[in-house]
Image (spheres, rainbow, N blue to C red):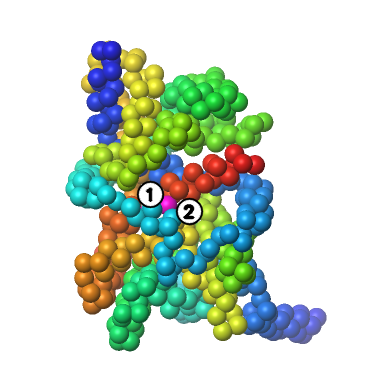
Amino acid sequence: MRLKLFLLSLAFCFMAAFSAHAADMTARQTAEAGADRIMALLNDPAFKNPATKAAIREKIEDEVLQLFDFDEFSTRTVGPTWRKFTPEQKSAFKTAFTDLLRNTYIDTLDEYNGEKIRFTGEVVANNGKRVEVQMEFLTSKQAYPVAFRMLEKKGRWVVYDVLIEGISMIKNYRDQFRDILAKGDPQTLIERVQAKAIEQKEKKLKEKKEAK
Amino acid sequence: MKRLFPTLLLAAMLALASGCAKQADQIEPAAPAAQAESAAATAQPAAAEIDLDDYDSPSAEDAALSRDPLEGWNRFWFGFNDGFIQYVLKPAHKGYSAVVPEPLRNGISNFKHNISFPARVLNFLLQGEFAQAGIEFSKAIGNFMVTLGFGDVTSRNTPLFPYDPEAACFDHTLYVWGVPDGPYFIAPFLGPGTVRSTVGFGGDAAMKPQNYMIDEWYYTLAFDTYLHFNDAGKLIKAYDAVTEHAIEPYTALRNAYMSQRKNRLEKLEAAKAQ
């Protein structure tokens, strides 16, 4: 009985692994599978355990990097000016911007408290090359509309923008960066993003200390 | 006529408000599943016209969102309001929430909403939305009968006629009348808005009966300021969510406010077209 159960679950795991890497998954399936895996990790009791927490968090970060394309985030937030960046500036900006997003959002994972995601629909545009997958983030009190904009890259769908309550994260940053680039050069922008990333990190550390 | 001055003063001075309050309001529960599903389904046929990928060459719509001819004025009052929120409102509201428990704050918040119902009814009438005016009226009657106005027992009832409480403001009435939006405009204490939304805020204040019930205008002002202060928790949260992670908080707030305003109008138009 036990062996049967074991084999069955093994087969199930293989199937899940296979389907996750199949290139013919639609955008919505990719988003759903990715969100499911991240939610499963967040619900894992090991995530609440301080000893095993770091490992789970790393796994979550891996999943996030699979689903969200930080190259796309970087090029799109800068916009057309991106072509004027030197290769060094491009990689420096990408690192700084990724750090900023990580430092800003990673700690919100700790605040996770059983919230759920419900997929509500999708909009296919640009001849099927771009898809907006719509969902709701359900807290105990309210439902927040969230949407992923996705494109296909190397045979798999990745997220290139996140809309929270209809506000595009990338367009919001792009508006800010356009202001900075209008007055300064790429180097100024990189430095300001780096400074903000560090500021966010220090603020979170301070908040943690105060909480203790 | 004597009362018009205090009302206008109120419109101009009121701590916190239209723009900000509306922004906070929008963190309301989204449409129920069935509605969301049908909205998505109806969005499908029009999909061919939608360009989801206008990041490289900003669309005309995006350019309109960042149009800001009054930037000098706006930046000044943004700085003023920001200081007010960080150094006055936040600490004051923190102390207030520690003393007044959440259920009581919610009750007062409901009371504020319920006593303003004549303004909403009037706006629906001015827009020619007679069925919605009726729904608004009956909802208020229900709330007053059951809870004296301190509860909200009717918001979960599904009206027989499509009803959108977000349209019940003078800003939207002006929109229905064809008044253009005007540029982005930040008013002291009122927060982000457009020229039309700021005028709309004044119009709403002039329609609220509580602004006529008390003889002394400074009591009226104090009363209204208190009701807005009681609600400031939502506002602070929404403000932080937009500006905390921003490198240029001024631009981030403008983008968030204008996008939300556009989305809300599109939602209202889509609901009407159905």
Vertical comparison of B125 with A160: above or below:
above
Please tell me which residue is depicted at 65% across the width and 72% down the height of the picture.
Answer: A26
In which chain is the residue bearing label 1?
Answer: B
| Location of residue B270 (image quadrant) | top right
| Location of residue B96 (image quadrant) | top left
In the rendered image, the quadrant that contains the C terminus of chain B is: top right
- Judge whether residue A39 is colored magenta: no
Vertical comparison of A6 with A125: above or below:
below
Asked whether B103 or A73 is in front, the reply is A73
Mark number, residue B200: none
Q: CA distance from mark 1 to mark 2?
A: 11 Å
Please tell me which residue is depicted at 52% across the width and 31% down the height of the picture.
Answer: B152
Q: Position of residue B20 (x, y in %)?
A: 35, 42
| Location of residue B50 (image quadrant) | bottom right
In the rendered image, the quadrant that contains the N terminus of chain B is: top left
Q: Between label 1 and label 2, give the one nearer the viewer.
A: 1
Vertical comparison of B152 with A204: above or below:
above
The kind of residue tagged 1 is Tyr
Residue B18 as seen in the image, left or right of residue B267: left
Please check whether the numbered discs 1 and 2 fall on a single chain. no
Q: Position of residue B52 (x, y in %)?
A: 52, 64
In which chain is the residue bearing label 2?
Answer: A
The answer to whether residue B144 is visible is: yes
The answer to whether residue A114 is visible is: no
Asked whether A40 or B100 is in front, the reply is A40
The kind of residue tagged 2 is Glu
Q: Which residue is mark 1?
A: B257
The kind of secondary structure element at disc 1 is: helix
Q: Which residues are magenta?
A: B255-259
